[in-house]
Image (cartoon, coloured by chain):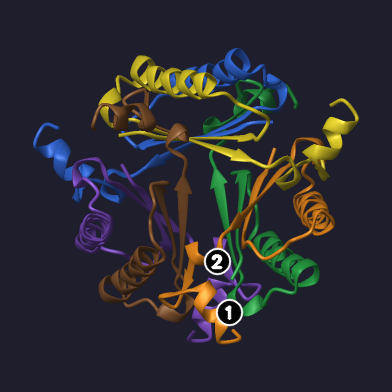
Chain colours: A green, B purple, C brown, D blue, E orange, F yellow
Amino acid sequence: MPYVNIRITDEGVTREQKQQLIEGATQLLVDVLGKNPATTVVVIDEVPMDNWGVAGELVSDRRKRGQ
Amino acid sequence: MPYVNIRITDEGVTREQKQQLIEGATQLLVDVLGKNPATTVVVIDEVPMDNWGVAGELVSDRRKRGQ
Amino acid sequence: MPYVNIRITDEGVTREQKQQLIEGATQLLVDVLGKNPATTVVVIDEVPMDNWGVAGELVSDRRKRGQ
Amino acid sequence: MPYVNIRITDEGVTREQKQQLIEGATQLLVDVLGKNPATTVVVIDEVPMDNWGVAGELVSDRRKRGQ
Amino acid sequence: MPYVNIRITDEGVTREQKQQLIEGATQLLVDVLGKNPATTVVVIDEVPMDNWGVAGELVSDRRKRGQ
Amino acid sequence: MPYVNIRITDEGVTREQKQQLIEGATQLLVDVLGKNPATTVVVIDEVPMDNWGVAGELVSDRRKRGQ
């Protein structure tokens, strides 16, 4: 029954990568806690780079500087 | 003052259905806990089917198999 | 597969009230969107009144004033 | 290491306003709790007005009435 | 910069298991998306079994029936 | 109507500091976006240091090393 929410910046994540994130997070809960995969939910939120800040700066500005 | 967040897959939910979800969730908090509806907030997140996984699979793949 | 998160202040909600919130929110998703109740998850967060603010004030202070 | 999530209705927030929100929220954590800005994350979610309800009503309907 | 939130029922998760969840989720983001582990945040929420519902039922009631 | 969620590690935040966080976050939304403070909600989550990871490590372990 676990619920996992993965929040990342929206930078061209492919369908295959999303599949890998969902598979990997589900397996992690099975391996570590013995959870039932059938009821494990994983939700990926892709957040625009103008909406994500770190160190008080937009990620879109950090990317321009090569960070 | 309650805050309710309803997360569902993005599959053509209509404006009228959203209205019903918001009305119903607000009324639930009034009925069960006597909360003030004026300050009850409900936020609906529609998540792309490629971003939602259950049982380690994308919902978009499950839908193709008729699940 | 919906995920519903109900956040309320921690003010003595009983086990029976929690059951009613979970049952009501699940039924709402069934009635409005035809969701499968077996995979509908509802999580209730009870937040201390010192940790919840509205109008720039702690709820614990508002309660003292009878609001 | 704090994580701040600001959820607002999607009503034409500019890039400069987002920068101000991110800068302001980061500074708040520095000023009040002495947190390290380098590891303070702020994420802004812009929610469609049809997906946000208050008092059991869609914000989009409230806006039509001038609220 | 990813933010991962793992929500599970509060059923005696050990410190070592938490370490494994945090390590595993961080590594997943590194492996699949090439994210920088230094700025990857993982937060685990342990939710009381009376506050988590599935299929319209409290998890605490499901556990009593051996589910 | 904004909703702000501030998640921090549980390290003895005082009631006065919580008041300052709630006041500051509310004022930020007023100043930058002209939001109505009366309907601005701020919720602070204090997360145990064993439940928060960064760089694949528990914060409780980082604190022992003086980070």
- Under mark 2, the amino acid is Met
Quarter of the image holding residue A62?
top right
Q: Is residue B8 left or right of residue A56?
A: left
Instruction: Determine whether C29 is above or below D22 in the image.
Output: below
- Residue that appears at 79% across and 59% down: E14
Question: Please, what secondary structure does the residue beneath circle 2 have?
Answer: helix
Q: Which mark is residue E49?
A: 2
Sequence-earlier tag: 2 or 1: 2
Instruction: Determine whether D17 is above or below B1 in the image.
Output: above
Q: Which mark is residue E63?
A: 1
Question: Please, what secondary structure does the residue beneath circle 1 have?
Answer: helix
Q: Residue C39 in the image: x percent, y percent?
A: 48, 76
Instruction: Determine whether C1 is above or below D53 in the image.
Output: below
Depth check, front residue: C57 or A50? C57
Q: Residues within 10 Å of mark 1 (few under 14, many from 20)?
A: few
Q: Residue F5 in the image: x percent, y percent?
A: 49, 36
Depth check, front residue: E58 or A60? E58
- Residue that appears at 52% across and 33% down: A51
The N terminus of chain B, quarter of image: top left
Q: Are marks 2 and 1 in contact (CB under 8 Å)?
A: yes
Q: How many marks?
A: 2
Q: Which mark is residue E46?
A: none
Farthest left residue?
D65
Chain containing the residue with disc 2: E
Q: Is residue D14 left or right of residue A2?
A: left
- Residue that appears at 55% across and 66% down: E49
Q: Residue B7 in the image: x percent, y percent?
A: 43, 59
- Under mark 1, the amino acid is Arg
Chain containing the residue with disc 1: E
Quarter of the image holding residue F3?
top left
Q: Residue E13 in the image: x percent, y percent?
A: 74, 61
Real-space CA distance between mark 2 and mark 1, rounded to the nearest whole angstrom: 9 Å
